[in-house]
Structure formats: structure tokens, C-alpha cells
Image (cartoon, rainbow, N blue to C red):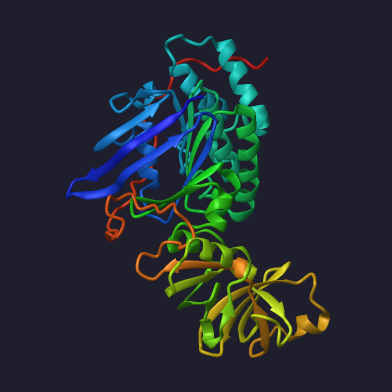
Amino acid sequence: MARVKLTNVKKIYSGNVTAVHDFNLDIADKEFIVFVGPSGCGKSTTLRMVAGLEDISEGTVEIDNEVVNDLQPKDRHISMVFQNYALYPHLTVYENIAFPLRLQKNPKMSQDEIYERVTSAAQVLGITQYLTRKPKALSGGQRQRVAIGRAMVKDCKVFLMDEPLSNLDAKLRNQMRAEIILLRKRINTTFIYVTHDQTEAMTLGDRIVCMKDGYIMQVGTPTELFDWPANLFVAQFIGAPMMNTIKTELTKEGKTYYVSPFGYKLEVTGDKGKLLNERNVEPKGIYLGVRPEHITLVKKGAKNGFPVTILVNEMMGSEYHLHVQTEDGTKLVVRIPTINLTDEERASMVSGTVIYVAFEGKAMHFFDLETEYNLLTDNQYHGNDDPDAPIKSNEAESEPQEETQKEPQEKQPKEK
């Protein structure tokens, strides 16, 4: 277990292409941190710099208060799980898991101790019955468990995982996600997990680092990123379906704020209205953000209610995802739970039907038109000394590579 600290870390490739810009992060001992963002945002590159698989162009990486910039990966006391499993096809499951233990020299591990660790890890991961099989005889989920087992048998300070579930189908991803949560409780070490899937980020992480184009967009708990996104990018990236954003005006009459989307004047009620007053936010043009699940079905004439026409109804089982259009042509997505709908209401949820929806002030998010920063938060992330500087988007994310160690010569011990 160890604290990990990245200070002013940069990665610059040939051609002056900067993949990671001035990355600063302090990860506490035993914390589960998730790097999330779209392809090319620099999340895997950052992870590989921590692992020692990529050289650090500028800045420092510390593990357990020791600068590791010049240390080889084997000397950093880390374990890593790759996206493509990186299993040896000619070795059995047992031999794959035991491989890093047989490479260990100081102290050299006995065959009995290797057997104990491998079988213990296999039992935790539910792959004991597959120890004598080769990887080609395993499913994708079973191969990933083997890769995780190989990483967890080592005495490591930091556990690194680079998109370990991206090659699995949806059902296996859900199952393995739950298993990683349980695994974290068992081994209780520092985790750094990379994914492009915001569902994985929200369910796994103690904190999330949301990245774009090599910059940190926001660092916070899943609740903080969902309820208080620092900028428009985080607001739209976190949450599914994506947050609705409407270009409109924020106005003020006395101490009451209003927004005017779709040609309707809607009052900003509740805590968001109070916070706008406390911060004395000036009336201006804004991006108004509202999440699809925070738009509710209402009766005609309800406060803040407005009519919309259903374009498409996606039946998701427990809810409808309605793609609707307002009278001024603005398109929105609305999530409507089906449990409280009458049979008549369900039958009416078809293309062309006009329904009335509304959202409260507490569901509103306000973003500056120029900077796209949230008007109600102070945590503005950009990773640049000049917060108004444009972010370049020509960075490319490096691909994980397979391990290249040779096959160990020791024979597998007999099962006890």
C-alpha cells in the first residue's frame, strides 16, 4: 500500500506532440482512483508513466514518497492488468499466474509458497477449476480473471488496471465490475484504474479524474462530478443519456433569477436560486444544462411546464428514453420511469404525441458561454496557467503493450 503523487507531469512525443499536460494529482494510500475520458485524452499514457512503461518528459512521479522516474517497472512495486490480457498462450492458467513469482529473486520464493499464493488467488477469483487449462480454452471473462490473478499474487504497493473490461460483452462487464469492487475490499491496496466507460468510473472510483486532450477537466467523487460538474465537458461526459444543454439567457428581477429556454420564462427555484444570489452572478448568456432524468412528466398548466412533441420513444424496460422537440425546434432527451404510468399514458407515448414536461430549479446547471465553466463552482480545472487558453486536441493515446519476459524454466509443483 502506498501514496502516489504526480507533480507537473508531462508527456511529449516526437514532433512536439504533447499527450499529457502538466498533470498534478495526489492519490492517498488505499484509494481507488479512476482516470476516465474519451479516446486520445491521455489517460492510458499517464498510467503507463506511473508504471514505468513510458518515459516522463517533465515532472515527477512518487510512489510511497520515493521518486520513481528513473526506476525500471520491476523496481516500482506495482502490478498491472492490461486491456488485452497479455497471457502466455503456451502456459497453463497456473503457470501464467505463477509467472511473476518465479521471476522474483530477492527473496526467491519456494515452490510451496508459490503454490499457496496461486491457489489462494484462484479461489478468490473463482478460477480454481481452470488452473490446468490453457488460455485458448477460456472465455473472455475467465482470461481477464487470470490476468487479474497474475497481478494480485505479487506483493505490490500500487495496482494498475488499463481498461481491463473493454474487451468483454455487456453482461460480463457488469459481472466483472462487481468482482473488481469485491477484489478491492479483499486486497485493500492503492488502485489506479483507466476506462472510457463513465459507468465503470462512477461505480468503482473513490475519486474520478476526468480528462480531455491531455488536460485534467475535474477531480472529485462520483457525486461531485455528477451533481456539480466543473465545466460543460464533464457535465456532458458524465451521465447517460448525456445532459441536455440549451443556449439561453440568465436574467434577474429583484432577487429572483430566470432562464428563458424554448421561449418560456422559467424561474430558478430552490438552492440553485439562492446560490446564484449568494455569488451575485451577473445576468448573461449561458448554456443551461438539465439531465434527462431530472425532467418530469407534468399536467398542462403546471409551474415551469412546457409542451414537447415526441419524436422517438426508446423502451428501456424500467423507463422510456423520449427524444422530444420543443415548440421552437430544440431537441431534448427525457427519461420517464414506467412504474407510475397508467396504461393510457403508456399507450400515448408514441411519435407525434404532445406531452408536457418540466424541471425544477435544483435540476438546472449554468455554464458560461465563453469559458464553459460552471457558474456555481469554484473548482475550475484546465491544467494550464491561462484558464482561457484553447485546448489543443491532436494528442494520441498510446496502446498498451504485452509483456515480453521469457518462459520460466521451473516446473509446476504437484497439486496437493
* Residue for point 63% across, 22% down: 119
* 380 relative to 143, above or below: below
Residue 228 position within the rendered picture, expressed as x and y whole percent measured from the top left:
53, 57
Quarter placement of the C terminus: top right
Residue 193 position within the rendered picture, expressed as x and y whole percent measured from the top left:
49, 41
23 or 100: nearer the viewer: 23
The quarter of the picture where residue 414 lies is top right
Residue 110 position within the rendered picture, expressed as x and y whole percent measured from the top left:
53, 9
In the image, taking residue 61 as reference, residue 233 lies left or right, namely: right
354 or 403: nearer the viewer: 354
* 8 relative to 242, above or below: above
Q: Is residue 200 visible?
A: no
Q: Residue furthest right?
A: 343
Q: Is residue 398 visible?
A: yes
* 416 relative to 27, above or below: above
In the image, taking residue 282 as reference, residue 300 lies left or right, namely: right
